[in-house]
């Protein structure tokens, strides 16, 4: 039912986020342990993305990380934000 599906969305979201963090570590050489203001600035500078886009992406990521369930809409948005961010 619905609960199982949302749990699946949650695990897919966690996988996508971990995969994205791995990209940050290997491609941009940014440690992802502490995601503070300094981290955001580093991601912004190394990625060439605006501060605004960087902040928006990570606010959404942190929200997902703190959520117990993830909707299909949130999963789609997460995917779009990450893809847009990775496309230079």
Image (tube, helix red, strand yellow):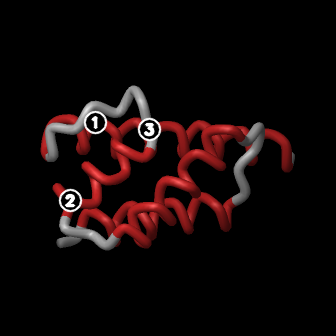
Looking at the image, do the residues carrying marks 1 and 3 touch, with CB atoms under 8 Å apart? no
Res. 86 mark: none
Residue name at image x 32 percent, y 66 percent: 85
Q: Position of residue 61 (x, y in %)?
A: 54, 50
Residue 66 drawn above or below residue 61: above
Residue 7 picture quarter: top right
Where residue 44 sits in the image (x, y, percent)? Answer: 28, 60
| Distance from the alpha carbon under mark 2 to that under mark 1 | 18 Å
Alpha carbons under labels 1 and 3: distance apart? 14 Å
Determine which residue is flagged by label 2: 45
Of the numbered discs 2 and 1, the one sitting upstream in the chain is 1
Q: Which residue is mark 1?
A: 22
Q: Residue at x 56, y 66 (%)?
A: 76
Disc 2, disc 1: CB below 8 Å?
A: no
Are dots 2 and 3 in contact, CB under 8 Å? Answer: no
Dot 2: element: helix
25 versus 43 height, above or below: above
- Tag 3 secondary structure: loop
Query: On the picture, is 26 further left or further right than 44?
Result: left
- Return the disc, 2 or 3, that comes first in the chain's sequence: 3
Query: Residue 86's x, y, as percent?
Result: 26, 63
Q: Quadrant of residue 60?
A: bottom right
Nearest to the observer: residue 85 or residue 39: 39
Element type where label 1 sits in the image: helix
Which residue is denoted by mark 3 in the rendering?
35
Closer to the camera: disc 2 or disc 1? Answer: 2
* Residue closest to the eye, 61 or 54: 54
Residue at 43% in and 72% down: 52
Find the distance from the CA under tag 2 to the CA under tag 3: 15 Å
């Amino acid at each position: 039912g619905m609960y199982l599906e949302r749990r699946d969305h949650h695990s897919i979201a966690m996988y996508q986020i971990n995969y994205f963090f791995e990209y940050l570590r290997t491609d941009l050489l940014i440690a992802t342990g502490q995601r503070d203001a300094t981290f955001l600035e580093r991601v912004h500078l190394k990625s060439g993305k605006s501060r605004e886009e960087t902040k928006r992406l990570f606010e959404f990521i942190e929200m997902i990380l703190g959520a117990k369930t993830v909707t299909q809409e949130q999963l789609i948005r997460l995917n779009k934000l990450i893809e847009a961010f990775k496309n230079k």
